[in-house]
């Protein structure tokens, strides 16, 4: 067997190994813990479904509005899992992330099968898709993985099926279009995108069918729909803040280069990379449009569309309309999202769970550029793309491990506080989630513990050390809340598992609460030299309004290699009044 025959097989092997590595990383942090919207979309959904008295009510519950969305697909997946005897939230996370494999398959079908390119062109796409820039929300948060990832994949799949242009794929596209709408709110834009797609191609019969489908779907979607108050007027935003809208649209499109979580905002230096990438995506989009309308000015027929849906799709596979139609969905989504937010609207937009939209826009731009370039330039572009995507993905694992593990430790303390104090302390700053989570958890544990049971706390067994350690405790002045800053510059452990770290305990005569601290990550150069991901020390800014009024002794639990050790600090905090002293 020659080297030329071996290399493609090795490339396939590398892709499989890279995907396996991603899911191994995913499994490290998959703790089967409900979080945020999971309470409503899984546990409360099942309670309401079981309480429904007839089939009509049960179906209605599947389609119930949640905030601005109708997340039928999320509920449907959990319904199927429970009916299969799998109420485990881990499986929900795995299903959500498995859509990334479907996304890779689509690009494999387009580039490798339709455009007859070599498998090497799939490497940059693999590196970009399977890496943790989605951070905790997009990777591990069950409800998020079933909303943000599938809606992106369903939208591209819908355009792909329309592009293939056969009877069978068209009817399948209606199904994927339906699921796109009922997976997340921006999925509605696939209806408009598909109409534009079919209209440009002058496929009027299919256009008419899709128009009827769009009308029925939207009428159904907005039947008894409640407008969410508190949102700004999108039309006024568009007229009054065009600069802001343009900037945030560009940042949204290039958002996978954003490292920090951020509110919508005006342009800042930290947005340079994402804004530049967003500009590149938009310019690529306009290049697509130019190439599609250019034949009109040259008096040439734009498309060679088969006269029958049953004819071979190969006749249309050479056109660039797939890339144009697919990326249009993400540009519309980014634009509408920015229009519907203002800089005074305290809603996260430059946040990890939205980055799948950016990844898809980048990959679509990459695919279009690949098929556009001549062979010599194509090879150079491939080499550069492989190097850049590999370096980015590797750095992504280094950088986002911190955020994912940090959130995971916080969830572990939330779970422990629920088991022992029946309080979801991690949601206390948001009054709705604290109250709702308690009520849903209590009812679900009473009625349906056979469907889903909260996993045991990792702190059930704790060894006590004879050593003591001081913690620096400092009151932080804040008009809206009482804040305490706790830190230690010296404490250090060898943390080997995702839940390893340093935890604070507040213990009174009546209750004990656990809080996860933030470890201090080593710089990239220091990490490479020392092989230590964390430096010495930890810190935690704690809102004392989370904690019931009492006097607490402060302790430290060090978790190393899944073993817990308690260390006394000899210090206490007094929260018996709003103006308590700390001593």
Image (cartoon, rainbow, N blue to C red):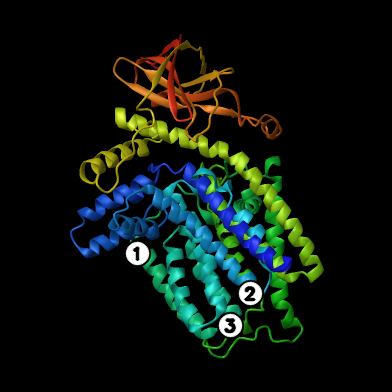
Badge 2: few (under 14), some or many (20 or more) residues near its Cα, within 10 Å?
many
Which quarter of the rendered picture does the N terminus lie within?
bottom right
Mark identifier at residue 313:
3
Q: Are marks 2 and 3 in contact (CB under 8 Å)?
A: no
Q: Which sits earlier in the primary sequence, circle 2 or circle 3?
A: 3
Give coordinates of residue 520: x percent, y percent.
59, 27
Q: What residue is drawn where x is 54% and y is 62%?
A: 103
Q: Along the line of sight, which residue is nearer the eye, 156 or 298?
A: 156
Name which of mark 2 and mark 1 comes first in the sequence.
1
Say which quarter of the image contains residue 328: bottom right
Name the secondary structure under disc 3.
helix
- Mark 2: which secondary structure? helix
Q: Residues within 10 Å of mark 3 (few under 14, many from 20)?
A: some
Residue beneath disc 1: 223
Distance, label 2 to label 3, CA atoms, is: 13 Å
- Residue 321, numbered label: 2
Q: Nearer the viewer, mark 2 or mark 3?
A: 3
- Residue 370, relative to residue 502: is it above or below? below
**Disc 1 and disc 3: Cα gap in Å?**
38 Å
Query: Local crowd at mark 1 within 10 Å, few (<14), some, or many (≥20)?
Result: few
In the image, is residue 408 above or below residue 230? above
Residue that lies at the very extreme toward the front in this rendered image? 1
The quarter of the displayed image where residue 259 is located: top right
Image quadrant in which you'd find residue 200:
bottom right
Tag of residue 142: none
Q: Residue furthest left?
A: 53
């Amino acid at each position: 067997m020659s080297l030329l025959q071996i290399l493609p097989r090795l490339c396939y092997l590398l892709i499989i190994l890279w995907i396996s590595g991603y899911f191994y990383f995913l499994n490290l942090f998959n703790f089967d813990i409900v979080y945020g919207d999971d309470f409503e979309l899984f546990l409360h959904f099942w309670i309401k479904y079981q309480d429904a008295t007839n089939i009509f009510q049960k179906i209605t519950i599947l389609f119930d509005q949640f905030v601005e969305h109708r997340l039928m697909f999320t509920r449907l997946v959990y319904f199927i899992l429970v009916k299969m005897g799998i109420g485990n939230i881990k499986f929900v996370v795995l299903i959500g992330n498995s859509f990334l494999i479907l996304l890779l398959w689509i690009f494999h079908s387009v580039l490798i099968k339709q455009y007859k390119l070599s498998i090497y062109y799939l490497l940059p796409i693999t590196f970009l898709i399977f890496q943790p820039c989605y951070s905790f929300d997009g990777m591990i948060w069950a409800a998020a993985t079933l909303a943000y990832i599938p809606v992106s994949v369903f939208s591209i799949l819908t355009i792909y099926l329309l592009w293939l242009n056969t009877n069978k794929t068209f009817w399948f596209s209606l199904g994927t279009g339906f699921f796109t709408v009922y997976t997340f709110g921006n999925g509605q834009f696939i209806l408009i995108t598909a109409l534009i797609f079919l209209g440009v191609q002058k496929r009027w019969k299919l256009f008419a069918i899709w128009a009827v489908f769009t009308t029925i779907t939207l009428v159904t979607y907005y039947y008894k729909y409640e407008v969410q108050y508190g949102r700004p007027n999108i039309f006024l935003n568009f007229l009054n803040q065009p600069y802001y809208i343009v900037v945030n649209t560009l940042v949204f499109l290039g958002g996978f280069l954003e490292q920090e979580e951020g509110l919508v905002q005006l342009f800042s230096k930290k947005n340079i990379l994402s804004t530049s990438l967003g500009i590149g995506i938009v310019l690529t989009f306009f290049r697509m449009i130019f190439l599609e309308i250019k034949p009109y000015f040259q008096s040439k027929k734009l498309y060679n569309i088969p006269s029958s849906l049953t004819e071979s799709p190969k006749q249309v596979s050479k056109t660039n309309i797939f890339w144009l139609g697919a990326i249009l969905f993400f540009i519309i989504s980014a634009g509408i999202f920015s229009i519907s937010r203002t800089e005074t609207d305290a809603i996260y937009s430059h946040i990890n769970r939205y980055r799948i939209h950016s990844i898809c826009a980048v990959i679509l731009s990459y695919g279009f550029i690949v098929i556009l370039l001549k062979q010599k330039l194509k090879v150079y572009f491939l080499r550069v793309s492989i190097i850049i995507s590999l370096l980015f993905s590797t750095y992504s694992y280094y950088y986002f491990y911190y955020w994912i593990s940090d959130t995971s430790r916080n969830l572990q303390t939330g779970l422990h506080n629920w088991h022992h104090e029946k309080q979801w302390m991690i949601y206390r700053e948001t009054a709705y989630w604290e109250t709702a989570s308690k009520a849903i958890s209590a009812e679900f544990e009473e009625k349906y513990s056979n469907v889903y049971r909260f996993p045991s706390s990792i702190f059930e067994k704790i060894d006590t050390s004879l050593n003591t350690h001081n913690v620096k405790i400092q009151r932080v002045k804040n008009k809206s809340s009482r804040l305490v800053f706790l830190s230690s510059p010296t404490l250090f452990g060898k943390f080997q598992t995702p839940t390893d770290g340093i935890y604070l305990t507040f213990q009174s005569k009546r209750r004990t609460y656990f809080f996860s601290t933030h470890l201090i990550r080593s710089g990239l150069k220091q990490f490479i030299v020392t092989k230590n991901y964390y430096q010495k020390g930890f810190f935690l800014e704690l809102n004392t309004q989370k904690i019931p009024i009492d006097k607490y002794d402060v302790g430290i639990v060090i978790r190393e290699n899944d073993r817990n050790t308690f260390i006394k600090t000899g210090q206490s905090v007094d929260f018996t009044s709003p103006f308590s002293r700390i001593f």
